[in-house]
Image (spheres, rainbow, N blue to C red):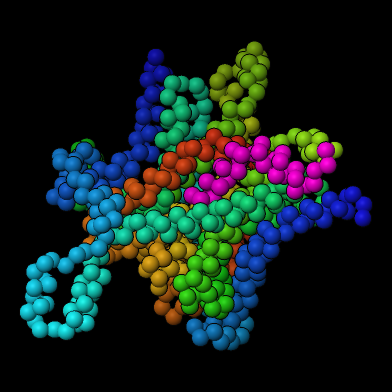
């Protein structure tokens, strides 16, 4: 009985340890500013304004008050001057364009994860189910490359992209970033898919070849349908890695505000003159939510993919 | 062409696109870093060869040695903390109980959520004025006499704590799945021979999870030794080697040659650690 209670207490403490920062985030995102100093996690009064501002697309542009039009008319300015002033007012509005950043994050993550999963499924088929000289070396290289990353690669990659002239245009920057993300997730995709593919009996391939299928046909008709879960898992895992990136986005998208991702947007929001805790937290919640749901959906499969590979 | 030759050609063809990308955007950049580390790189693009000047400059720089010290402390703390806590949690959850799946899902949250969304809730949580943490320690329990700013006063502790919190689920999940496949009959047999729970743990559980735990701790060392984002976002004034590399390369005079030399030193340290670890601990 005592043992049971101790166990229960340990599990509760563990859950509290994991959840507290998220509870804090959720709580502040719903609090009015006068309540930030209140240490209770439950707000006295619920304030949904921060979410309203982030989700409602119509409020992403600050419209000038009617009185400003009147004042500008009375100031005797030309139409061009008036428009310039109004435009500057709208641009200075500093409202967090959540929809835009969400779209940017989504596109970058989708494209790089899709390409990585496709290329890795070809490569992993070769590494996991075929025999050829040099395979061991390739396997080890992929594993080493998977462990490398971060800022050590950032210096040469940035330098290379700059000297290739890619950073001079928005399109070029996007291309450079997409390629870098692709290579960031490709090794882990190869590694995981290799593990999943190895677990499928090779006799199926032999049977396919008897029936006259080529290697490509076997991959497409036999291995891929059997690995639908594995392919989804790898795609989602890659998607999450790219979605969560801060470093490369911050280096490459500095000078293109329109291309910013959510990670970068929240960072800028923190430093902007409108840095308000409820908005930062609401943006954090909305950035985390899709990724958490996705991660939960692949949890079991992901575990299998990693443990298949770590063998004595 | 014989069948094995055709097989080999098809195999290479399938892996080729991935290899080209990895070669072009990982292996080539590594060599390029090594190359740049011998040059004084200017923003305009004209590189002038300076030999080992960058390296010599670093080795005589106090900031470098300080960064190296902080990095060692951070990496040791996070590797040990993540591994020990991860294994402890795996052992705790390695039994059937109602709600186990839910607990596992909650435990994975810190690892699954985007870093950027955790950073600001941590800052708020430890905020000396508004945060729950200080309120609990000072007002609710009176463990500390006055409010303090953990982030400013003990930044290394703060980022180690964060890193353990964020990364232990990965270790816990994988160790747990190894625990689950241990052959039950081993325990039964040991029980018949009169082994108590402690001996069962020591002579069955530990050897079974030793390999995966050591492998995970090696991976954790490598990842945290080159960790940039967590440190930079939570304690921007604390210079670990990766953060120092970032500041050297991308702020101020953007000294990419010097930054490359820094990167090369870090890669060498990692390779040394890996080779010793793989031989001594993993026994390969």
**Residue at x 51% of width, y 30% of height:** B91
- Does any portion of residue A144 appear in the rendered image? no
Q: What is the total number of numbered labels drawn onto the structure image?
A: 0
Q: Nearer the viewer, residue A299 or B91?
A: A299
Outermost residue toward the front in this view = A79
Q: Identify the image quadrant of the N terminus of chain A.
A: top left
Outermost residue toward the top in this view = B192
**Residue at x 58% of width, y 30% of height:** B179
Q: Identify the image quadrant of the C terminus of chain A.
A: top right
Measuring from the top left, give residue B231's x and y in whole percent: 42, 58
Q: Is residue A66 left or right of residue B45?
A: left
Q: Quadrant of residue A84?
A: bottom left
Measuring from the top left, give residue B49's x and y in whole percent: 61, 85
Magenta segment boundaries in residue numbering: A211-240
User: Magenta region, mostly helix, strand or loop?
Assistant: helix
**Residue at x 51% of width, y 23% of height:** B95
Measuring from the top left, give residue B85's x and y in whole percent: 47, 39
């Amino acid at each position: 009985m005592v043992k049971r209670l101790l166990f229960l207490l340990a599990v509760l403490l563990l859950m509290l340890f994991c959840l507290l920062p998220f509870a804090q985030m959720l709580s502040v995102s719903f609090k009015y500013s006068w309540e930030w100093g209140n240490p209770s996690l439950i707000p006295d009064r619920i304030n949904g304004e921060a979410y309203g501002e982030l989700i409602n697309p119509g409020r992403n542009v600050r419209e000038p008050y009617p009185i400003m039009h009147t004042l500008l008319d009375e100031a005797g300015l030309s139409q061009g001057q008036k428009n310039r002033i109004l435009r500057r007012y709208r641009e200075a509005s500093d409202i967090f364009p959540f929809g835009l950043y969400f779209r940017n994050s989504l596109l970058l993550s989708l494209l790089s994860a899709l390409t990585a999963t496709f290329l890795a499924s070809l490569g992993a088929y070769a590494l996991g189910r075929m025999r050829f000289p040099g395979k061991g070396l390739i396997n080890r290289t992929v594993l080493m490359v998977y462990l490398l990353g971060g800022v050590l690669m950032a210096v040469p990659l940035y330098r290379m992209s700059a000297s290739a002239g890619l950073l001079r245009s928005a399109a070029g920057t996007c291309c450079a970033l997409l390629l870098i993300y692709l290579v960031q997730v490709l090794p882990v995709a190869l590694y995981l898919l290799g593990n999943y593919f190895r677990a499928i009996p090779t006799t199926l391939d032999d049977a396919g070849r008897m029936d006259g299928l080529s290697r490509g046909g076997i991959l497409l008709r036999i291995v891929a349908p059997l690995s639908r879960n594995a392919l989804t898992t790898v795609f989602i895992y890659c998607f999450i890695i790219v979605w969560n990136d801060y470093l490369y986005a911050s280096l490459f998208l500095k000078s293109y505000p329109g291309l910013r991702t959510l990670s970068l947007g929240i960072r800028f929001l923190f430093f902007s003159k409108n840095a308000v805790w409820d908005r930062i937290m609401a943006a954090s919640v909305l950035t985390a939510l899709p990724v958490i749901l996705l991660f939960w959906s692949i949890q079991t499969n992901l575990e299998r993919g990693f443990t298949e590979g770590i063998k004595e | 062409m014989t069948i094995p030759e055709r097989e080999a050609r098809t195999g290479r063809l399938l892996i080729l696109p991935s290899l080209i990308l990895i070669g072009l955007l990982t292996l080539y950049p590594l060599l390029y870093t090594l190359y740049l580390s011998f040059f004084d790189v200017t923003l305009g693009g004209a590189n002038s060869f300076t030999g080992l000047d960058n390296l010599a400059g670093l080795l005589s720089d106090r900031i470098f040695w300080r960064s190296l010290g902080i990095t060692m402390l951070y990496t040791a703390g996070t590797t040990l903390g993540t591994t020990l806590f991860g294994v402890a949690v795996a052992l705790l959850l390695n039994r059937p109980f109602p709600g186990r799946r839910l607990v596992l899902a909650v435990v994975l949250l810190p690892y699954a959520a985007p870093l950027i969304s955790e950073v600001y809730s941590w800052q708020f949580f430890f905020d000396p004025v508004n945060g729950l943490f200080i309120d609990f320690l000072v007002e609710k329990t009176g463990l500390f006499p006055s409010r303090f700013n953990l982030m400013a006063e003990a930044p290394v502790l703060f980022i180690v704590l964060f890193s353990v919190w964020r990364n232990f689920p990965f270790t816990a999940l994988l160790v747990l799945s190894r625990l689950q496949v241990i052959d039950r009959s081993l325990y039964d047999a040991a029980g018949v021979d009169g082994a108590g729970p402690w001996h069962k743990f020591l002579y069955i559980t530990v050897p079974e999870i030793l390999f995966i735990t050591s492998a995970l701790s090696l991976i954790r060392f490598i990842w945290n030794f080159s960790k940039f984002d967590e440190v930079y976002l939570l304690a921007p004034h604390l210079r670990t080697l990766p953060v120092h590399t970032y500041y050297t390369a991308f702020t101020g005079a953007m000294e990419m040659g010097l930054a490359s030399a820094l990167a090369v030193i870090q890669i060498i340290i990692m390779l040394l650690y890996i080779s010793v670890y793989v031989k001594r601990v993993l026994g390969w």
